Image (cartoon, rainbow, N blue to C red):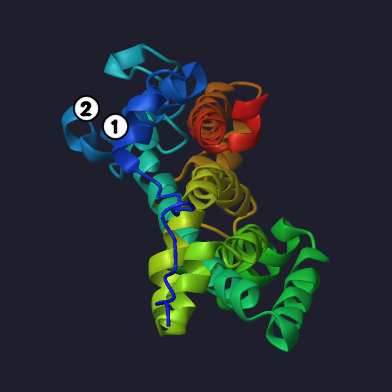
Amino acid sequence: MKKLELNIEKEKPYRFNLKDKASLLLKSKSAFIGGIIVAIVVLCAIFAPLLTTHDPYEMDMGKALLKPGEENHILGTDQYGRDLFTRLVYGARVSLHVGIVSVAVSMVIGVTLGLIAGYYGGLIDTIIMRIVDIFLSFPVILLAIALVASLGPGINNVIIALGFVYWTNYTRIVRGNVLSIKEEEYIQAAKTIGSSDFRIIFLNILPNTMAPIIVVATLGIGVAIVSEATLSFLGLGIQPPEASWGWTLAFGMKYIRESFHLSLYPGIAIMITVLGFNLLGDGIRDLTDTKLKRR
């Protein structure tokens, strides 16, 4: 009797190689420009004490609402006499912290549910996707506002709220990829040799869904930063005296006529940071999407 052999060499699984993609990023203009912007923002957040000469929380009412360039204040001062440039640099820490951690939370929830729904299918898939449909039926920002309003303002509650409302994107994308990947020959071969579902899902399927996950996560950080700024603008997010771009912009609106710079510079900071993450995400998508490459 001839020995039955499984030939899995013809259809090898695709593995997301971070080193190869990192080198390809240099060839994408949008990814390169976005990466530079993101790197600058990250470096400013890390080295904030070295880049600033003022205390972000020190008030001096005698220097309130100074114009940009006056009395050694590059971007002027706010209504409490605090250096605006220092507040913006330290605000980058808050925005990046909220953006990265909230995306990590939503990624863990969404990817896990997407893997389970796509792999097992049937009733489990139906239940998970109906829950996704329920979440998608609500405007995301209104759902985030409702959650923060019930939990209370603060950076931790903002992270929980944003992580809880943005997981659906990961679930839908991962589920769609798993439905096609689980039919590949190497997955069938893994089942034949007795590999556990846990091993197949997290060691064989998950690595092959990393490309779209990274793209969604990169774009999601920009969305989370805007959402945090929106919540802070409404008074539901980061609370004073913590440096926050959204909070600074909101209070600047009260002095928009005589000191428009209070709202202008935080808005520019948000715009540039989100633009950087969007360009980086678009570049990564172009490099990892095989359909776009074929075109």
Residue found 63% across the figure and 48% down from its top: 230
Residue nearest the viewer, comparing 279 with 12 = 12
Q: Amino acid at mark 2?
A: Leu
Q: State which quadrant residue 75 falls in.
A: top left
Mark 1 neighbour density, 10 Å: few (under 14) some (14–19) many (20 or more): many
Marks 2 and 1 sit apart, C-alpha to C-alpha, by 7 Å
- In the rendered structure, the answer to whether residue 135 lies left or right of residue 83 reads right
Residue 18 image position (x, y, % from top left): 33, 42
Which is more toward the observer, 197 or 113? 197
Element at label 1:
helix
Is there any visible trace of residue 270 in the rendered image? yes
Identify the residue position indicated by label 1 in the image. Answer: 44
Location of residue 276 with respect to 71 vertically, above or below: below
- Quadrant where the N terminus sits is bottom left
- Look at 44% across and 68% down and name the residue there: 6
Residue 129's label in the rendered image is none
**Residue 100, position in %: x, y?**
42, 52
Which image quadrant for residue 122? bottom right
How many numbered discs? 2
Name the kind of residue labelled 1 in the image: Cys
Quadrant of the snapshot with the C terminus:
top right
Q: Residues within 10 Å of mark 2 (few under 14, many from 20)?
A: some
Q: What residue is drawn where x is 49% and y is 43%?
A: 218
- Sequence-first tag of 2 and 1: 1
Q: Farthest residue to the front: give it.
A: 1
Do tag 2 and tag 1 residues touch (Cβ < 8 Å)? yes
Which mark is on residue 51? 2
